[in-house]
Amino acid sequence: MNLEGKKQIWSSYQKDIAEDNYYYARSCIRQNFYPASEVTFLRILREELGKNIFDDPNHTTCTGIGYHSDIVPFDTIQTVIARHFALMTEAGLENIAISCVTSFGMYTEILDLWEHFPEQLEKIREYLYKATKREFNVPKNIAHTSDIIYKFREEIAQKAKYKLINKETGEPLRVVEHIGCHYAKMFPTKGVGGAEFPQVLSGMIESWGGNVVDYPERRHCCGFGFRNYLIQANRGYSVSNTKKKLESMKPFKPDFIVANCPGCAMFMDKWQYTLAEMEGVTYDENGYGIPVLTYEEMAGLVLGYNPWDLGLQTHQVQCESLLDKIGIEYDPKAKYLDKNGNQLPIPESPMNLKV
Amino acid sequence: MIDVLIIGGGIAGLETACSLQDLGYETVIVEKEKTIGGHLNDWDTLFPTHRSAAEVLEHYTEETRKRALTIYLNTYVISIKKQNDGIFEVQTSRDVVFHCKSVVLASGYQLFNAERKEEYGYKIYDNVLTSADLEKRLKNLQGEFTTPTGVTPKRIAFIHCVGSRDEKSGNHYCSKLCCVTAVKQAIHMKQLCPQADVFCCYMDLRMYGPGFEEMYREAQEKYHVQFIRGRLSEVAENANGSLQLKVEDTLAARPSRLQVDMLVLMVGMETAKSTELFAQSCGLECASNRFVKTKDHHIGSNQTNVDGIFTAGASIGPLSVFDTVNHAKSAAFAVNDYLKAMK
Amino acid sequence: MDYVAELEKDIRFQEALHSCLNCGVCSAICPAAEFYNYDPRMIVTTVQRRNNDEIERLLKSNTIWYCGQCMSCKTRCPRGNTAGMIIQALRLLSQKCGFFTESEKGRQQYGLKKTIGESILKYGYCVHPILVKPELHPEQGVIWEWVVQNQDAVFDRLGANLYKDGAGAMRKIHQKNLDELAEIFKVTGGDDFYNLIEEDSKKKAKEMNMSTDENNNEYLMHVLTYNSNEHQD
């Protein structure tokens, strides 16, 4: 693999990412499975980078999962997203920071559509006004939240307490990244680094000391597939596609997986458990599975945040081996404490997947 | 006063120049490179006969020498202006301004830059080559053939239509020569590495010329080259440096993964950047594929929208050596008609 | 009904289908094509032929329901087509015509409406801890089970604001915001579409002798869990 060739591609896909003053669009899946990642993102922006970001209680889902499950009509999702633009406009903001890859794809697609079909934009303005009496400006800048971390990756590196380096060997950690289909596959120029060799996570990994490992199924879908997971009867599709990725990355012996999209992170974590329980297979050498981090968790670890504040205890594949590799200090006894320091019950152990 | 200024010293330019000189016209060739012969310099063998490209080149070198043609090397054209008296003023990179009665565009083509097809990993994965890279490798071959990482290839794939028939690459048209080149190179690889499995992934096999279909048949029957009807979707590198291809076998309607040691991208032809440079200065019309537009597709393929400016060879679109030589010859006749009428 | 004319009214269809040269780059990387007897290229070919009978067969089949909407096909198509968006148009039409209940995979739309669809209007987000029940989600594992069992304490520990007023992750969405969402659904046809799925599904349930009562929704459990493993059409 020749990095120079990738750099050549990266240079042609650098997008504008706003400096400051963002309207925060939460993610259904991220806040559900990785609430601490959203907390961490806001903390990094506000406390480490001194940015202004508005977390609006009036925000709702964009309905993207419903839309891609073909139960929410196109006009409906456009109007719901228009409402978010109205909330942003009312807050005096022009930049939107979206915490979900599918939402990011939807927002991008809709703005593109409105550009090509202005009459559609007018129709949606009328719908929104009729339904809510709200009006809106389209955002000046739209970024996925990882774009913002990417933009400030060097600032974060300067404040870092840890590097993505194996403490024992001094070697960079081998990191596998997963971007999430809706980030740039639909609109390559809207993603940092484009669709084929996205740089958004690679950039963070390299700035923080790690090595990105490419593997053949890197671009393949995590296996969500909307109705193919949401309907229990269809989950064979979901687990099979994830398995394909895990098998493909195994020979590269990754130290961890980092995902751009919250759903992808969740599936690659949970399906490792399922595969271990169903088939007795794991994709690391010792039977623990490959830890899967969100990029907020990765950034939080680098900045020295407490792993239990980051929510690593809620991952099915345990992360302690990774923490030990980096040399991160943590208190094993605090793993299952509540906010006030009271002990919570200890989760059951899986049958096959070691914890 | 020069009668004909010929832009390009490849086989098109040389053939036109020789013919016009023989008809008694004073001709000058300007060539941007340091040698004549154009792309033929980089090629090992030619389809469908597998004869050496050097042989053809030698023929033209000899013909050029015999006629003592005037050739300006390392010189490129900046602008062409037609004056009111019908004489062309041609500005070049050398501070030389030519005045001539007619101009022949024999400025040819350039190969598609395969880096633009990002998902194929050219310049990222070591064992991904272009058809031109392979020709160079074959031309300079000493001893056993190996891939760029030094492996004797057991599986090789040729990918047709790279940068052709592909709007995402900006080229909607067929480059027409890549199919037959792929078959030629596939046979060549089988001759060098008889144990290797060789695959050609194509969309439509365009074996349009004399001897082409026969070569295709030979590739199947004698060399057992395997033809898969499907366009390559993406390439990735395995841990051992081999490559994984994702391609649908469209005749079986199933997606498939192909593991190979070496991948050859059949890069298409694009209009030369150098042509685009001066085309605007003289109001030369280009077709939607950006090559020079011919005045009449059927009966005026050497004429352009500007009287006195002619085309020879691949400046009008992808052409084989065979077609280029014929087109160049007919260019000489077209120029002759024009200059005779001028007197 | 002239299905082609109906499809052409869909703005997504207009954007997604120019003409197909059958190269197969979409199918080569399609996750659904790897798993099912499915080929996005063939969908495009069928639609491109504009044969009404063939399209009707498609609308009634399992085939249009296999796509996972990853949109990987959009990146690659050399003619700028998007099979995944043609699928969206076909699925919409299948539901509008009431054909979706004729196939096993199509009937699942009822399950999606009842879960994700209703969660949107009830909680303001597509996914909620309450929706990801460990008994319906064994793959979520023992840690998720632990999260759900200790929901308040765990979300609290992680800095979320589960089912409470104010900002933050998993907060309770204020009624006025839910009202706005509901109004948007009403104005834009989202409500009508939910009702259409509901009504056609109930008709089908009756035909299949299954109840759709709130307390014992046999049909819902059926569409969520039944898999014949015969997906040849």
Image (cartoon, helix red, strand yellow):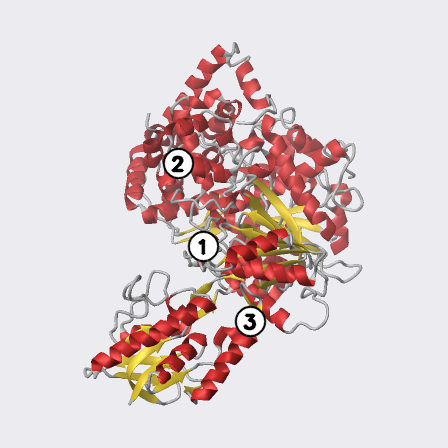
Residue A167 image position (x, y, % from top left):
77, 59
Q: Is residue C94 above or below residue B185?
A: above
Q: What residue sits right under mark 3 in the picture?
A: B43
Asked if badge 2 and badge 1 are on a common chain, one would say no
Residue B155 image position (x, y, % from top left):
68, 55
Q: Residue furthest top?
A: C209
Q: Looking at the image, is mark 3 or mark 1 earlier in the sequence?
A: 3
Q: Nearer the viewer, mark 2 or mark 3?
A: 3
Question: Could you tell me which secondary element the residue under label 3 belongs to?
Answer: loop
For the N terminus of chain A, the quadrant is: bottom right
- Quadrant hosting residue A237: top right
Q: What residue sits right under mark 2 in the picture?
A: C49
- Quadrant hosting residue C6: top left
Image-based side of B281 in relation to B57, left or right: left
Q: What residue sits right under mark 1 in the picture?
A: B166
Q: CA distance from mark 2 to mark 1?
A: 22 Å
Question: Could you tell me which secondary element the residue under label 2 belongs to?
Answer: helix
Q: Residue at x 40, y 38 (%)?
A: C48
Q: CA distance from mark 2 to mark 3?
A: 43 Å
